[in-house]
Amino acid sequence: MDPRTLLELMLADLDSAPELYRPTDFWRTGLEKVVADLRERGFAEFRRHPSATYFYAPQYAPVSRPAAALSRAFGMAGGPGTLLRERIDQVPVARAHHATVAALEPADRSPSLTGFSESTAGAPAEQLEFDGRRFSRSSLNYLRGLVMLKRAVPDLDVSTVLEIGGGFGTLGEILLAGNPGLRYIDVDIPPVAAVATHYLREALGPEKVLDYAATREREKIVIDELEQPATVLCSWQLPRLTGTVDLFANFISFQEMEPEVVANYAGLVTDLGARWLLLRNSPTGKPNVREPMLRHRYLEMFDRYELVDSDAGLYGQDSEGTVSEVMVLARRS
């Protein structure tokens, strides 16, 4: 199904979805803007949409017009001006993030991250090249989190990964690009679920992605019977998912939800038998939510798990001036 038709199908079904699976306060403001951009501009250059760079396709470079204009002006100056432009665009921060991945990844352990180069699908407004490979703020955030996970769990054995709130599909691209046999399931609200479906099809090949239209009428969605390596589901389908997963990931999006919504998701993830959790959260929570999701709430809601490692520096720094905490949790025996 083409992405525009898929988007409209998801939005139509969203109207009847239970409240716990609908956009929360943070996303209600963004949903209209993202949908409007996709309807007016299409999906081919979605990573250039103003709503995307603000809500789900982050950049190192400033998105504000005055700062972006200043960056361009310094870039045209050449010489020292180029260095100033890179400083404004936070290229040194991105370079340090890449160096962390390159230096610290245990390359002899799975899942393999070596050789990853981000797709140009979606016409990214920002994409940085290091060692001849392409990266973005999104992919370097995920790569550093995965490096931390691999170092924290030496006997890590992952074949099925579940993510809630996967943005435009970066984690799925990273994992499936270099790990044959691995399965990735992304659960999200529309319109982002439609964007992720489109991106993963462009990045991995359309034959490798199972879309919402193929599963929307299934009363049970059996993990071991999923036909493609990547599956994108809408949030209200998660209770129908049956089987087990090895790793559950959530990067920031839980902090865009109210605690009762996260508690429901945490229960469903626990019931799916996830052995490890990889979580990224802001120590101060997100604005525009009724009640912020802070570290202690994660630990309370995932009470069948113990904290293995956490970091708000080497793996947690996001962009200059912002810090996230990355946590690895293991299921209690």
Image: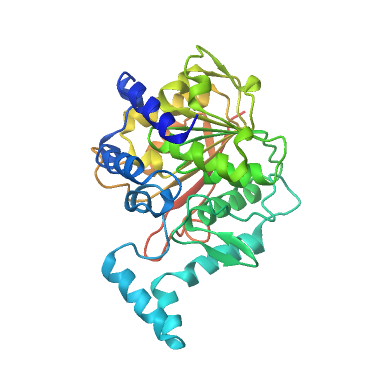
The structure's colour scheme is rainbow
Residue 144: x percent and y percent?
56, 55
Q: Look at the image and tell me whether residue 280 can be seen.
A: yes
Tell me: residue 86, above or below residue 216. Answer: below
* Residue at 51% over, 54% down: 141
Tell me: residue 43, above or below residue 69. Answer: above
- Quadrant housing residue 295: top left
Among all residues in the image, which is located at the extreme top?
219
Query: Is residue 124 toward the left or the right of residue 62 in the image?
Result: right
Residue 189: x percent and y percent?
39, 32
Q: Quadrant of the C terminus?
A: top right
Tell me: residue 176, above or below residue 282. Answer: above
Query: Is residue 266 toward the left or the right of residue 49 in the image?
Result: right
- Number of numbered discs on residues: 0
Q: Look at the image and tell me whether residue 57 can be seen.
A: no
Among all residues in the image, which is located at the extreme right?
108
* Residue at 41% over, 34% down: 4
Q: Nearer the viewer, residue 42 or 324?
A: 42
Residue 71: x percent and y percent?
36, 74
Q: Nearer the viewer, residue 51 or 329?
A: 51
Query: Is residue 41 toward the left or the right of residue 156 in the image?
Result: left
* Residue at 32% over, 39% down: 35
Tell me: residue 131, above or below residue 315. Answer: below
Residue 131: x percent and y percent?
65, 67
